Image: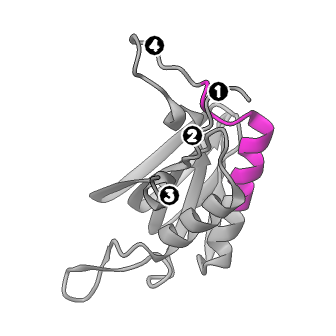
């Protein structure tokens, strides 16, 4: 184990008009209206957490209905998702000024859970899921709508002893 097992998958969700990700000058993923999801996988995270998080994101009611209320999900609007793996969401900044990433999952495990998470978005009714390139230097363009940005951490669903 690379650090203390925290079992807390993290996602930053942004409601977007459009979003794209570029690697080495080439667009590798692009969406229209929907969600940009930055995903951080921590040491000890599980497929069950990926399932819960993907389901929550697919059903998260953050798009406006005909009355201007945030009452519709990405699946309700036939929206799309751009999911980008981002290990820096696992940063521990408690000590000093240089973040520690020791709690992030090992690359092989993180990629496996990232890929599983994107499959689960599709299984939860998202019509189109685009991805970045795992562990690549990516340039992400986001046209944030609102702006609406929500941070989810799977530890909110974990029972505290």
Rounded to the nearest whole Å, what is the CA distance between mark 4 and mark 3? Answer: 29 Å
Q: Helix or strand or loop: what does disc 4 sit on?
A: loop
Q: Residue at x 68, y 77 (%)?
A: 123
Q: Earlier in the sequence, mark 3 or mark 1?
A: 1
Question: Which residue is denoted by mark 3 in the rendering?
Answer: 158
- Pointer 2 residue: 6
Q: Which residue is mark 4?
A: 98
Label ID, residue 156: none
CA–CA distance between discs 2 and 3? Answer: 11 Å
Q: Is residue 98 above or below residue 148?
A: above
Label 1, on which residue? 3
Report if the CB atoms under discs 3 and 1 are less than 8 Å apart.
Answer: no
Q: Is residue 74 left or right of residue 82?
A: left
Calculate the distance from the C-alpha at mark 1 to the C-alpha at mark 2: 9 Å
Badges 1 and 2: C-beta atoms under 8 Å apart?
yes
Instruction: For mark 2, give the secondary structure.
Output: loop
């Amino acid at each position: 184990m690379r650090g203390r097992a925290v079992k807390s998958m993290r996602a930053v969700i942004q409601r977007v008009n459009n979003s794209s990700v570029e690697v080495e000058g080439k667009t590798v993923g692009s969406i229209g209206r929907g969600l940009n999801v930055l995903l951080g996988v921590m040491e000890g995270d599980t497929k069950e957490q990926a399932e819960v998080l993907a389901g929550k994101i697919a059903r998260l009611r953050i798009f406006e209905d005909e009355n201007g209320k945030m009452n519709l999900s990405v699946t309700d609007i036939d929206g799309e998702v751009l999911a980008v793996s981002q290990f820096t969401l696992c940063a521990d900044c408690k000590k000093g000024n240089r973040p520690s990433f020791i709690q992030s999952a090992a690359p092989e495990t993180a990629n496996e859970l990232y890929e599983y998470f994107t499959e689960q978005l599709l299984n939860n009714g998202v019509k189109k899921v685009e991805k970045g390139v795992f562990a690549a230097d990516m340039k992400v363009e986001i046209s944030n709508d609102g702006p609406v940005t929500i941070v989810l951490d799977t530890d909110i669903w974990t029972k505290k002893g």
